[in-house]
Amino acid sequence: MRITLIALLWVGVVFGAGAEIQVDDSLGRKLVLEKPATRVISLAPHMTEVAFAAGAGAQLIGAVSYSDYPEAAKAIPRVGSYDNVSYETLVALNPDLVLAWRSGNGDEVIKRLESLGLTVYVDESKTLEDVARSVRAVGKLTGNEAVAEAEARAFLQKLSQLRETYSTRQEVGVYYQIWDEPLLTLNGDHLISDVVRLCGGRNVFADSPVLVSRISVESVIRVDPQVIIASGMDKARPEWLDKWREWTSMTAVKNNQLYFVPPDVLQRHTPRIIEGASLMCEKLQLAREHYEAREKSSSQSE
């Protein structure tokens, strides 16, 4: 009887330990949950979307402003904005998991949340593969591994197809413009630079020391991109993209290579970024074909 009891206790210890959920976040920190999270708060619009993609939408009890995709996300109670979190509201909701965004929320917010005894998963996707990792991690933390795995695999399959089609084609220099006043772009560490590379492009501001860089018109003229791609605020092409037509000496302007990709499908680090990547690749391919045709015409005329 005593041996049986000891055996049962040993089995309980071994299998109890195995039941823990362990996930590494984007900072390489190990998160441990005794059971799947059922009360989740997202502190970034893209993490709200990732939660839905991972099958955890019904477990979200709080989100920040601009969490507007999918449609069901609009009904989730707000806990402030990504850069102005209401700690009082957040704590009152008693979450067992908080999804944070390092470059958006900032390290101080993350430290404050952890000092309040909250479990915080931090996302900072720098490559397209990181998006799939985030989906899988959130799925595991919330007990939705099967849904998350299916989503991640579908994403990676589409990514592989785009990479095979475009990544080794002739390189084109790309200036990606976030905004007009102030003039903002992204450096080579940003996820969108990985999209540019995927499409066979080169971010002309890849060496900028800051992730989101404030630049000048003169600096853009100096690097002389072959293509200018703008984002903006919504699905409409921003009027300020055409301001560049004033600078007729620029290669992109001379060749009418000014394009727009809606920010929702490119600037949010979610599975939908594959839609934005596909659009980006199409734009760069149009530019590539234009320059190749010009080069061919020039060589024939010599």
Image: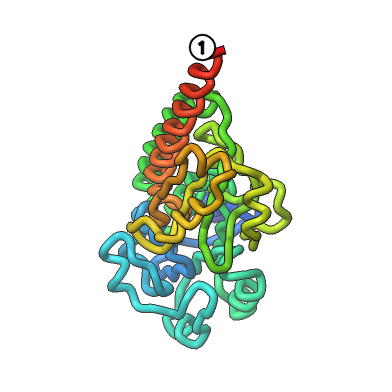
Q: Quadrant of residue 279?
A: top left
Tag 1 secondary structure? helix
Position of 230 compared to 104: left or right? left
Task: Reply above or below: 27 against 145.
Answer: below
For the residue carrying disc 1, how many other residues have a C-alpha within 10 Å: few (<14), some (14-19), or many (20+)?
few
Say if residue 2 shows up in the picture: no
Q: Residue at x 63, y 78 (%)?
A: 112
Q: How is the image coloured?
A: rainbow
**In this view of the protein, which residue sits in the foreground, 165 or 138?**
165
Q: Quadrant of residue 234?
A: bottom left
Identify the residue under disc 1: 300
**In this view of the protein, which residue sits in the foreground, 128 or 96?**
128
Task: Reply above or below: 117 against 152.
Answer: below
Task: Identify the residue at the far front of this view.
Answer: 302
Say if residue 228 shows up in the picture: yes
**Residue 154, percent from left and from top:** 37, 37
Q: Residue at x 67, y 53 (%)?
A: 219
Position of 209 compared to 72: left or right? right
**Residue 196, percent from left and from top:** 54, 40
Q: Residue at x 37, y 73 (%)?
A: 61
Task: Reply above or below: 162 against 43.
Answer: above
Q: What's the residue type where badge 1 is placed?
A: Gln
Q: How many marks?
A: 1
Position of 211 compared to 289: left or right? right
**Residue 158, percent from left and from top:** 39, 34
Quarter holding the C terminus is top right
**Residue 209, percent from left and from top:** 73, 55
